[in-house]
Amino acid sequence: MNSRELAKQLVIDLQDEICAGLESLDGEGKFQEDSWSRPEGGGGRSRVMKAGAVFEQGGVNFSEVHGKELPPSILNQRPEAKGHSW
């Protein structure tokens, strides 16, 4: 597993731990998950709890996005970055 995959797994595991801890603390609320992917590269998991005993509403989200070309806003400031992926 490369460093990018290790970092991603670390953050996903942390999201799992945070959600489990908040569900335990709340006692009633359960997180609903929506996974998504980005055609240009990456994806994520959005988790939302609503109408819990303690928490009215809350979210714990993870996203990992990447692409082949830097956006124009960056290239305007750093033209030398043209051709680099992110």
Image (cartoon, rainbow, N blue to C red):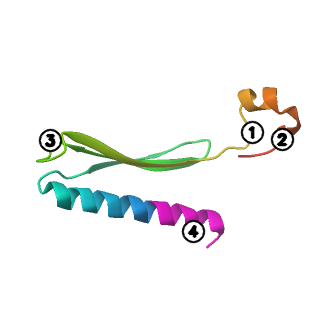
Query: What's the amino acid at mark 3?
Result: Ala
Residue 83: give its label.
2
Secondary element at image label 1: loop
The residue identified by callout 1 is 69
**Few, some or many C-alpha atoms within 10 Å of disc 1 (few <14, some 14-19, many ≥20)?**
some
**Which one is closest to the eye, mark 3 or mark 2?**
3
Q: Is residue 24 above or below residue 53?
A: below
Query: What's the amino acid at mark 1?
Result: Glu
Q: Main secondary structure of the magenta part?
A: helix
Query: What's the amino acid at mark 2?
Result: Gly
Q: Earlier in the sequence, mark 2 or mark 4?
A: 4
Q: Residue at x 64, y 67 (%)?
A: 3
Secondary element at image label 2: loop
Residue 35 shows in this picture: yes
Q: Which residues are magenta?
A: 1-11
The residue identified by callout 3 is 51
**Which one is closest to the eye, mark 1 or mark 3?**
3
**Few, some or many C-alpha atoms within 10 Å of disc 2 (few <14, some 14-19, many ≥20)?**
few
Return the residue found at the far bottom.
1
The residue identified by callout 4 is 6
Distance CA(mark 1)–CA(mark 3): 41 Å
Distance CA(mark 4)–CA(mark 1): 24 Å
